Amino acid sequence: MSTVIPAIVAPSATDPLFTGTVERRDVGAKDVRIDIRWAGICHSDIHTVQGDWGPQPYPLTVGHEIVGTVAEVGSEVTNFAVGDRVGVGCLVNSCGECASCAAGAEQYCENGATGTYAAKDVDGTITQGGYATSVVVTEGFVLRVPEAIPFEKAAPLLCAGITTYSPLRHWNAGPGKKVAVIGLGGLGHMAVKIAHAMGAEVTVLSRSEAKRDDALKLGADHYFATEDRETFRTLRNEFDLIINSVSAAIDLDAHLKLLALDGTLVNVGAPSEPMGVRAGTLIGRRRSFAGSNIGGIAETQEMLDFCAEHGIAPEVEITSADQVNEAWARVLASDVRYRFVIDIETLRG
Ligand code: NAP
Ligand code: ZN
């Protein structure tokens, strides 16, 4: 059995999104049904629908930055009750048995974690994301959203927040560390806020001067425009850690040269095009080039609690169900300040 609910649907890689429907399974013993209130728009939603990462199972509903209220719980659910303020991020399941899952790194599940959309679910159906009025998720993949975080701002933490928090923690951003963030978008602006709260000295590397004032208000200590080639001379050998959040291929080699001895550049941006690295650039200062994929479930809860404790929330622009195509166009133009959140009430009609 399943229920048909309102949702924003992508019919193909090229046609506009439209308001249609999606099916949700009935609540099983360990499931939680969430009435979705706010859904963030991540650049990954757009990459996916546009086919940047390969063919997709259309029609598809995307969205993996979800917050809402628990509406129903299964008979074996112990951690959640009707009325709880909860969130769901990029994962809705994993094997639970491999070494990665055992270590709380479900995002690296050796048997393949189940993505919130466009993934094959345990029952063989294709998962459908959060641009919809409700979602049914096994309780182990549901997060608690602290009261201290304004609800309309909370959704982007479930992807943009954890995707930047995880590498900042893993590579020990903190006092005495110089951290640079490339690209001031949804992920980038959260990287700035979180790295600043961790006590690091933060530099923003954006293409132009346009976002300077915003970056400094978000907590950056320094700001440089990468369209000015002088930036690459001034900042040579400067940073301990660089988080690259750009959605397109960049001149990676030029940015790697900004790392100090033993520094690491972590790619969280996921362009489909390859990026070139000269071996000599890495060898010359024992530099590392790394990647990082979202974060585990326990770590996501830790991030939400960290943000509540430090008074951190994303900067959001609220949009409505009938404006999502326009919002996507503005994300593609890097014109969002700094994350769109869909008011799901506008889907309920
Ligand atoms: P976004 O809001 O569109 O931000 C991307 C930023 O990159 C833009 O604000 C812009 O910053 C810069 N940029 C865009 N096009 C550029 C170009 N052609 N050259 C140089 N800079 C450019 O996107 P997002 O939602 O933050 O996502 C960023 C990337 O991370 C996407 O590829 C997404 O799929 C990926 N992602 C990865 C993970 C993961 O787990 N690793 C999770 C979520 C998202 P400036 O205007 O400041 O230059
Ligand atoms: Zn995302």
Image (cartoon, grey):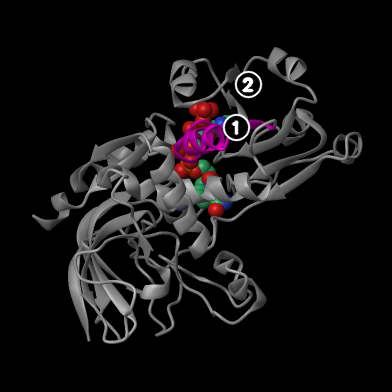
Q: Amino acid at mark 2?
A: Thr
- Closer to the camera, 262 or 303? 303
> On the picture, is 235 further left or further right than 31?
right
Q: Amino acid at mark 1?
A: Ile
Is 312 included in the stretch rendered in magenta?
Answer: no
Spatial separation of the CA atoms under disc 1 and disc 2: 9 Å
Q: Is residue 236 above or below residue 35?
A: above
Instruction: Categorize mark 2 by other alpha carbons within 10 Å: few (<14), some (14-19), many (20+).
Output: some
Residue displayed at 29% across by 71% down: 80
Q: Position of residue 197 (x, y in %)?
A: 52, 35
Residue at which label 1 appears: 182
Residue at which label 2 appears: 226
Q: Quadrant of residue 109?
A: bottom right
Which comes sooner in the sequence, label 1 or label 2? 1
Segment colored magenta: 177-199
State yes or no: Cβ of the residue under disc 1 lies below 8 Å from any atom of ligand 1.
yes
- Mark drawn on residue 150: none
